[in-house]
Amino acid sequence: MGRRSQRHKQELYGYKPPAVLPPAITSVTPSTALHGTTQSLAIVGTNFMAGDVINFRGVDYPATFVDSTHINVANVPMGVVASVIYYAKHTNGMVSPNYLYEVT
């Protein structure tokens, strides 16, 4: 029935469900981290959704959804490399462009 109702709305009223857009990261606080530490990150961007994760060095870390432009991630190990690339990922598999994070 739910599917039929949605189709009915589309036909009668031109209703279209909102498009799901991929996330994008525009900034991270703190902007750098020290080697070998564990860091909590406040991430600003666009199109974040509840259930998103942050992929950091191939590992998904659960994000706390604040709103569509803010998510937080706790206890991310910084390791010993000079910089790392990470991205945000929706539960449907859509990912943000890579974001470079400096570890000093």
Image (cartoon, grey):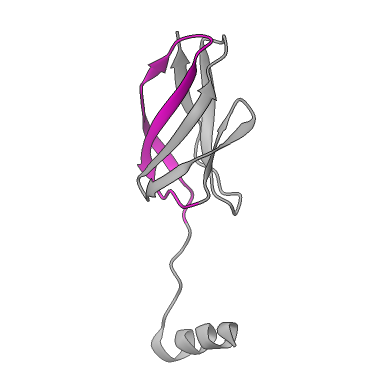
Check the image and report above or below for 3 versus 48. below
Boundaries of the magenta span: 21-50
Instruction: Kindly indicate the quadrant of the structure image that contains residue 62.
Output: top right
Q: The N terminus lies in which quarter of the figure? A: bottom right
Check the image and report above or below for 50 versus 32. below
Q: Residue at x 53, y 29 (%)?
A: 86
In the image, residue 46 lies in the stretch drawn in magenta:
yes
Measured as percent of width and height from the top left, residue 83 is found at 51, 15
Q: Residue at x 46, y 54 (%)?
A: 21
Instruction: Kindly indicate the quadrant of the structure image that contains residue 3.
Output: bottom right
Q: The C terminus lies in which quarter of the figure? A: top left
Check the image and report above or below for 14 versus 24. below
Measured as percent of width and height from the top left, residue 103 is found at 47, 13
Measured as percent of width and height from the top left, residue 97 is found at 50, 37
In the image, residue 76 lies in the stretch drawn in magenta:
no
89 lies left or right of 24: right
